[in-house]
Image (spheres, helix red, strand yellow):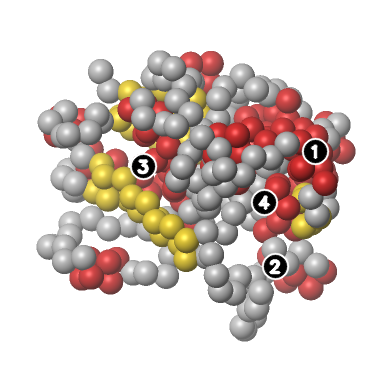
Amino acid sequence: METTDEVDVARTIGLGDLTFFAQVGYGGGAGCGVVGLAALAVASGQANVAVAWRSRKRGSGQRPWASRLGRLPAGLQFTRPFGLLRPVDEVAMLACRYMHEFGATRSDLGRIAVTVRAHANRNPAAVMYGKPMTLDDYLAARWVSEPLCLFDNCLETDGALAVVIVSAERAADLRQPPVLVHAFAQGLPQQHQTMTNYFNEDPLLGPSHACAPALWRNAEFGPGDVDVAQLYDAFTPLIPLSWEGYGFCGRGEGASFDGVPYNTSGGGLSEAYVHGFNLVTEGVRQLRGTSTSQVSGAQTCLVTSGEGVPTSALLLRRAG
């Protein structure tokens, strides 16, 4: 989902010879994935220094689902003609199913939107800085795709972010305090259909349920040891699905779970939407102690990419 090739980036910024270059598909599911692949390249000696990045120009211009030339991909042929045109429409279907199965309400989703907006109000770099929101504001907002309203949706913004990955030994001599990539995993469940999961026996068991076992298997700690989380929040229902998928609570309990501070920069809902890459950089800030909504003494951070698409996740750890 990236239209700028590696050769264009390398030539434009004047890089020398490259020994490693890679791209992960499905923008929303890729943020943690590119960081993880870069860390693997450094750990295996394929690169001494790796840069993982994401940029988007979406504050203006036509949305990619507004028109499509040629034949629809196979999965979309069964949904687009019947009104599921946008990602929000597809997530709205999952939200309806979740509410029906577990009794979650719009107020549960509203509390998520209000929580991340409060974080954004402490972050001068956030698009929604200085724009407070109450639960009443949320409930009064216009529909976008019922049961999801305006504030259940992420922002559309321009932006670019990058992280630099080197060995822990080299990072010890750098000016900024390093943060360690402790564990990394990707996840794509069997019989997955992007966003809607029609072919899964249970459509609410999304990619996080495939990613989480690999992530925790390679870690020295579990969900109960995570101090702060940065959960992919293109839409509010993805937060409870992620809490459940990564093992922080039981099925149906994600909508009311509040045991870990999350999305402390404002996330995609209220800081900016750069396919979740700002969640990675906020995780680094938390473990450096420089976040505008700093969690006291944070030593560990979970960062996730898109729930509903082929996904990835990182566990970050404070060095030292």
N-term mark: 2 or 3: 3
Residue type at mark 4 is Asn
Residue 36 - label: 3
196 in relation to 133, above or below: below
Q: CA distance from mark 1 to mark 4?
A: 17 Å
**Residue wearing tag 2:** 76
Q: CA distance from mark 4 to mark 3?
A: 27 Å
Residue 207 - label: none
Q: CA distance from mark 2 to mark 4?
A: 21 Å
292 in relation to 82, above or below: above
Based on the displayed image, in which of its 4 quarters is residue 221 positioned?
Answer: top left
Instruction: Classify 10 Å Cα crowding around label 4: few (below 14), some (14-19), many (20 and above).
Output: many
Residue at horizontal 33 percent and vertical 23 percent from the top: 318
N-term mark: 1 or 2: 2
**Residue wearing tag 1:** 136
Instruction: Classify 10 Å Cα crowding around label 2: few (below 14), some (14-19), many (20 and above).
Output: some
Relative side of 153 to 294, left or right: right
Residue type at mark 2 is Leu
Q: Position of residue 217 (x, y in %)?
A: 45, 25
263 in relation to 298, above or below: below
Residue at horizontal 43 percent and vertical 65 percent from the top: 2
